[in-house]
Image: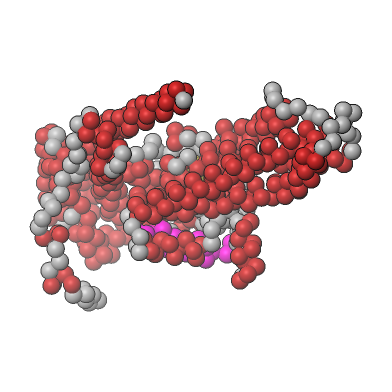
Amino acid sequence: MTYILIGIALILVFWIISTYNFFVSAKARIKAAVQEIGNQLKRQADLIPNLESSAKGYLKHEKGIFKDLTSARKAIDKAVKSGDVQKMADAGSQFSQILPKLQVLVESNPEIKGSGVVTKLMDELRDTSDKVMYSRRLVIDLTADFNVKRARVPSNIIASMFKFEELPGLITPEKGEHTSVSSKDVKTPKVNL
Amino acid sequence: MINIYEAIDANKRKSAIVIIAFVIFITLTTYVFSQAFGAYYGYKTGGLGLVGIAFIISGLMSIGSYYFSDKIVLAISGAKPADRKKDYIFYTVVENLSIASGLPKPRAYVIEDTAPNAFATGRDPEHAVVCVTRGLLDKLIRTELEGVIAHELSHIKHYDIRLAGIVTVLVGLVALLGDWFLRASWMGRRSKNKRSNQLDALFMILGLLFALLAPIIAKFIQLAISRRREFMADAGAIAITRQPQGLISALEKISADKEPLEVANKATAHFYIVSPFKDRAHGALNRFSGLFNTHPPVTERIKILNNMA
């Protein structure tokens, strides 16, 4: 009988330790994942000048694109320095808006399309905005794992015992236009070619 | 319509059930064999014993293929490291998805073969390799390739290669024991200290039965595990990319391709995203032959993915 009790106690202790360790290591991983967003944005900011100079010759007449690129880079630089995840994420999204503009430019201009340089620029742009997007995905996923475990029985006992607070993850406004659908959005878009 | 988290949970549960069934079956089989050997030779269980010896031999046979799986498979298939400039999309997709899944970036390799296919190998995420054929890179667009690579990365994340290695050792163990038992009864050399009682007779018959059937059953469960892990990797891939359509159209393209992959063989078949052998059987025959497949049918995988979309 006593052996059984000791056995149960051992299993319980083991479970408490492993659950506690999950929370602690998940927290550390989330912190690292947030830093990864900054890291990717830094890469993005460093990459743009190189891309600019390589494609400049082909985009002489498209000053608008360059203005966008430069202002996006500045915004990212500023956000990375401030160290605020939210600002970083916002700056990154400004950047990915340039891509469609470039696309239009390439499609309407066979000379640019043929050169390959601008296509390469677009590939790099898509890649770098993918990298930022996926590094945000990791933060979202890890935080979700943490928060789910924190709320679920029985691991919520450990969470409240050691006061693990719910983590915000990537902060998104929970109210606003993006959570509701207007009558305009419901209509199927028409594509005119 | 099930959401992605439910799909992953359900997959984990089903996978655990199959693995538990496998472990129970292996335990039962080794027990029967050790009892049957006992009935035959008056052999006492305990110590290392025949079962222990069989386990070590089977383990040694597989340990090399497990530990060096990345190097062996790459050497057999003639894969070359991917070049960031030349295979830009493939290289960067591997980079990006390993960021998303929180894994260290696996080494990326390309096989110069026009049949589209892909596989992952390596004993743990630190030694993982993702390998695709030239045909796959030529035929898929970026979103589809992301689906395929995410599938391979979730194999790596779930330690599927390690699981497959362990299962192979245990299947080998059963096959060895069965083989020994059959040989022993053929030779008909019985021990001098006969302890004939009813229980012994029962274990003799059971032993013979298990010697004939157990290796096949073990193989079936092994294949069931393999198919289950494919479903898991599909669901895991969607958890990373959130774009089921990419993986669906990639699977369609790969399975529609009639060209067989020359570098694949039976030993490496279970590594690939879609079985490199094209199945031709239909209907009831297909259902039966499905038991022998390392992969679930593509149509079924697409059906499940569509449910998640």
Q: Residue A182, relative to residue A156: is it above or below?
A: below
Range of residues picked out in magenta: B243-259
- The residue that appears at 33% across and 32% down in the rendered structure is A19
Residue B100 appears in which quarter of the rendering? Answer: top left
Q: How is the image coloured?
A: secondary structure
* Quadrant of the frame with the C terminus of chain A: bottom left
In front: B39, or A101?
B39
Specify whether residue A40 is in view. Answer: no
From the viewer's perspective, tell me whether residue A166 is left or right of residue B65: left
Specify whether residue B166 is in view. Answer: yes
Query: Magenta stretch: residue B251 in it?
Result: yes
- The residue that appears at 33% across and 57% down in the rendered structure is B3
Residue B78 appears in which quarter of the rendering? Answer: top right
Query: Magenta stretch: residue B121 in it?
Result: no
Residue B27 percent across, percent down from the top left: 63, 38
Give the total of numbered labels. Answer: 0
- The residue that appears at 23% across and 37% down in the rendered structure is A34
Q: Residue B120, relative to residue B305: is it above or below?
A: above
Residue A122 percent across, percent down from the top left: 27, 53
In front: B306, or B221?
B221
Residue A112 percent across, percent down from the top left: 27, 59
Magenta-colored segment: predominant secondary structure: helix
